[in-house]
Amino acid sequence: MRVVRFLFLMFAVARGVSNSSTTADDDEDQSCAAARKTKSYDEQCEIAKSDDCDSAYASTYYCAKSSGGRSGLLLVYVCWLVLLFSLLGSTADEYFSPALEQLSTDFGLPPRFAGVTLLALGNGAPDVSSTIHAVSSDRSGYRLALGALTGAGMFVGTVVAGAVMVVGGGAK
């Protein structure tokens, strides 16, 4: 029951975030977010298929002609996300954990220290490389890098910590 309440809370938070305006620029009107503001299915599909909205998920979702089709697509997307997370977890369990154990024994590190240092290094390396690429590739790439890093920090601080508390029976 706690897991259901947690999922409902996360859906409510995600709905609230998606309905609020996050930028003050006029750039939002030229992106996928403009599709939410229009009422016609045809206009939403046209915006989602434009070059400004470069997302296959958005174009598939907004080009569905009925709200039932969109609900079905949302369900498919959630199932796809669950599958991807389970595959990621099993891959980390099969390949990353044994490699981490071997590195810690080779370097003579205690398991806790290896988990704190080597695991954090392996977890943060993609964020560092994508941030370097975003900043060096475009003049406004720092916005993408800053948004990704703060978003990841907020996700870990809220969703992951909340999930751990819900599954663990609360803060003790």
Image: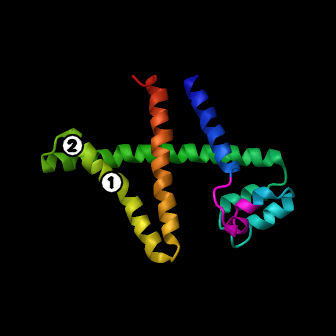
Can the viewer see residue 99? no
**The residue stretch that appears in magenta:** 21-34
**What residue is rendered at 76% in x and 56% in y?**
36
Q: Is residue 125 above or below residue 109?
A: below
Indicate the position of residue 40 as horizontal and vertical percent values: 87, 58
For the residue labelled by badge 1, is the local secondary structure a helix, a strand or a loop?
A: helix
Q: Mark 1 or mark 2: which is in front?
A: 2
Q: Residue at x 80, y 55 (%)?
A: 64
**x, y percentage for residue 116?**
27, 44
Determine whether, in the image, residue 4 is placed left or right of residue 158: right
- Residue 122 numbered mark, or none: 1
* Magenta-colored stretch includes residue 103: no
Relative image position of residue 115 (x, y in whole percent): 27, 43
Q: Say which of 13 and 54 sits in front.
A: 13
Residue at x-position 17% and y-position 40%: 110
Going by the numbered disc 1, the residue's amino acid type is Gly
* Badge 1: residue crowd in 10 Å (few <14, some 14–19, many ≥20): few
Colour scheme employed for the rendering of this structure: rainbow
Residue beneath label 2, please?
A: 113
